[in-house]
Image (tube, helix red, strand yellow):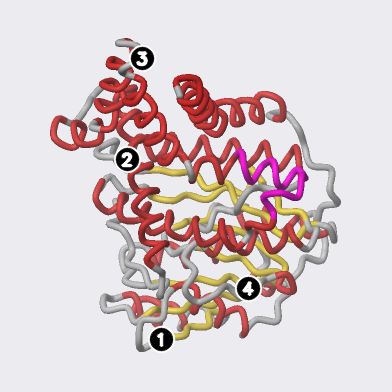
Amino acid sequence: MYNLLIIILICSSLLILHTYVFYPLFMILIYRNSNHNQLLFYSDDELPSIAILIAAHNEEKVIEKKILSVFNTNYPSSKLKVFIGSDASTDRTDEIISNLTNTYSNIEFINFKGRVGKISIINHLQSLCDEPVLILSDANVIFKQNTIFELVKYFKDSNVGLVSANIIKESSNNDGISYQEKKYLNFENKIKASESYAFNFIMGAEGGCYAIRNNLFSKVPSNFIVDDFFITMQVLERKNYALLNNLAICIEDVTSDISSEYRRKVRISSGNFQNLFFFKHLLFDFSSICFAFWSHKVLRWLTPFFIFICLFCSVFLIPYHKFFIWISCIQLLLLLFPLFNYFFKFNNVFLKFIAHFYLMNFALFEGFIKFIKGIKSSIWEPINRNV
């Protein structure tokens, strides 16, 4: 029994280290200076027509800035159409959008009178489009001047099915969870860029902003929550590239409200497990997709279980050696770090990241429970904006 518990403890620890340390560092260090060699559109080429799809619910703080950022890009306005679906907003979102339609005739505004959720809105908006390229973007993701062109330029290569933007996370302060979130999410961008260079695919476009060929768009089941991962994997299953372009920069605010961010993570985590079971057939096909899927996503989603397994093994190893008393106590102490941070507001960066790591994994575990119970709706509430 002793040897078995030691093996399980070591393997669980190594799997956590692989998904959070070994795989990211290997990818970033080996592929950080690579370049895509696909055919590209240039600014003086005949560019494709595009449709931008936006689902919004109570986004009065950001929706005007978002729409203006779209029309202030350098992409030809004659090639651009914006489809906005308001999911029964109860603030000034609808009024703001309606006013902007008087200025921009290429805005198509659909007002949903009852809550239907982001997935249903995006599925409906896509059915209205005949443009060859779609850009799906969240209401709080603000475009830079070159964002649209940088997303679209790779579609000259017929192998390219999807291109994800480089979303830079910003906040007006470093309070609450915002600092940790910015660092973590920007680190995620680096991993995805490395995957894009290495494999010509990424493990899930960032839902805040990505472009896809219209004919490769897959209708997302209405109760699914993480639509960006679902759509990306469908593109990969059709043997098309899914890239990240670091030059397609846009900006997203990061909340400092820990409770709001935790609820968002629980929601996304439940959607992750939906995708895991939907795409379980890819877990054993022994391909680069399989390797990246396990390394970047699956092991990360399973990390809360590895954490509990490590604690369980350590406790049951105490009778064999007193050393495991200390190991068990340290693990219990680390599990309490999010609570300590909530009450005492750590100033030390290292302690903040420990608390953030365990908070994310608590959210993953709670998301798994919600998935097991069954997810009937993808209806969402926007988090508190720092704007």
- Locate the C terminus by quadrant: bottom left
Q: Main secondary structure of the magenta part?
A: helix
Q: Amino acid at mark 1?
A: Phe
Q: Whole-percent x and y of residue 159?
A: 83, 58
Q: Amino acid at mark 3?
A: Tyr
> Which of the two marks, 3 or 1, is nearer to us in this view?
3
Q: Amino acid at mark 2?
A: Leu
How far apart are labels 2 and 1 at the CA level? 35 Å
Q: Residues within 10 Å of mark 3 (few under 14, many from 20)?
A: few
What label does residue 51 carry, if any?
4
How far apart are labels 3 and 2 at the CA level? 31 Å
The residue to which callout 1 is attached is 112
Please provide the residue range marked out in magenta: 282-295
Of the image marks 2 and 1, the number of the one nearer the N terminus: 1
How far apart are labels 3 and 4 at the CA level? 64 Å
Q: Amino acid at mark 4?
A: Ala
Is residue 46 rendered to the left or right of residue 212? right
What residue is drawn where x is 34% and y is 82%? 88
Q: Secondary structure at mark 2?
A: helix
What label does residue 359 carry, if any?
2
Of the image marks 3 and 2, the number of the one nearer the N terminus: 3
Is residue 175 rendered to the left or right of residue 226? left
Is residue 136 rendered to the left or right of residue 254? right
Residue farthest left in this picture: 343
The residue to which callout 3 is attached is 320
> Which of the two marks, 2 or 1, is nearer to us in this view?
2
What residue is drawn where x is 43% and y is 64%? 139
Do the residues under discs 3 and 1 have CB atoms within 8 angstroms?
no
**Is residue 21 depicted above or below 287 in this figure?**
above
In reply to whether residue 286 is colored magenta, the answer given is yes
